[in-house]
Image: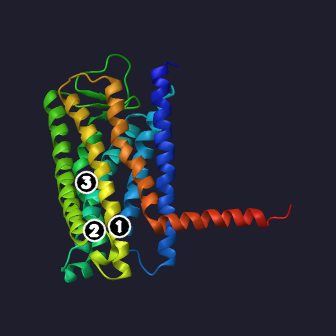
Amino acid sequence: MDLCVTIKGVSFLLQTGLGSLANALVLLAYAHMSLTEAHLQPVDSILSHLAFVDLLLLLMRGVPQTMTLFGLRNLLDDAGCKVVIYVYRVTRAMSVCVTCMLSVFQAATIAPGLSGLKLRLPRLIVPTFAALWFINMAICIAAPLFSVAPRNGTVPPFTLNLGFCHVDFRDNLSYVINGVAVSVRDFAFVGAMLGSSGYILVLLHRHGRTVRGLRRSQGASMETRAAKTVVMLVVLYTVLFGIDNVIWIYMLTEPRVSPVVADMRLFFSSCYAALSPFLIISSNKKVKARMVCASSSSTDQKDSKPD
């Protein structure tokens, strides 16, 4: 096997494997919280939904991509390609939308005043999730129309060669319209999350970094830590989003895109889904506590077994 292909295969394998495991652990931690606590805080509900979306994203794209790079062919037929590409498009869109939602809700939570809105925030979580899923499923409905299983022979112009599937846009107009529509949607949500995160930073700076600077209560301490986690997630997404879109803009200027370039874009576009759960685990004390308890319980059970 070619060294370059091997490196790409190992990279996608590590990204998909470690990212999926971390997202699954975050989901299990929040599932345990929902069973042991009266109710989840809005930020916890959103973070658990983000982990679910990112897990689906990695499985839908990372697994077939990795298998293809390691030499497996004809993994999917046309119908399979349409399903995989559609689910990936929807979950990728949901990833940016949920991150934006997280930033906006957290900004509203720590903002001074707005007591009436803060009381309504928990009731707005589920309707907002439902609206985002419905909107993105409707927007991405065209994606399956262009998705087909790979054909033998030369790849036609204006086709994204993903290895396990081809996304054939037929002509330059469809190719560019699709790219511009996706970019405009993403830039709109990234702009909103940057604005709300900037507001969070202003509040944190204005009131100081201590709990007493924001609110003189235990709840304020939790909100401050959550706010910092949200800002770090937004910064991570923005950096990877920038790299992803630089490659995407280049791809829009080329009728025939090299598979290497397409693989690079896929890798960077999936990095957020793989890295965000590690950031959540490292910065969220409640999630970390559940994992430590689970690990300690497992160790105690092993030690209690008779030799």
Drawn side of residue 83 relative to residue 234, left or right: right
Give the residue at x 17% y 26%: 253
210, 37: nearer the viewer:
210
Q: Nearer the viewer, residue 230 or 96?
A: 230
Let me know if residue 108 appears in the view. yes
Q: What amino acid is at disc 1?
A: Ala
If you read the primary sequence from the N terminus, does the residue marked by circle 2 or circle 3 appear first? 2
Label 2, label 3: how many angstroms apart (C-alpha)?
A: 22 Å
What x and y, as percent, mark residue 114?
A: 18, 79
Q: Residue at x 21, y 82 (%)?
A: 115
**Quadrant housing the C terminus:** bottom right
Q: Circle 3 — which element?
A: helix
Q: Position of residue 262 (x, y in %)?
A: 32, 30
SS category of the residue bearing label 1: helix
Q: Label 2 amino acid?
A: Gln
Given residues 117 and 49, the one toward you in this image is 117
The residue at 21%/29% (across/down) is 250
Q: Quadrant of residue 280?
A: bottom left
- Type of amino acid under label 3: Asn
Q: SS at mark 2? A: helix
Residue 106, by quadrant, is bottom left
Question: Could you tell whether 95 is left or right of 182 in the image?
Answer: right
Residue 15's disc number? none
| Residue with the mark numbered 3 | 136
- Residue 246 location (% of width, % of height): 23, 35
The circle drawn on residue 226 is 1
Q: Are marks 3 and 1 in contact (CB under 8 Å)?
A: no
> Where does label 2 land, which residue?
106
Which label lies toward us, 2 or 3? 2
Looking at the rendered structure, the number of numbered marks drawn on it comes to 3
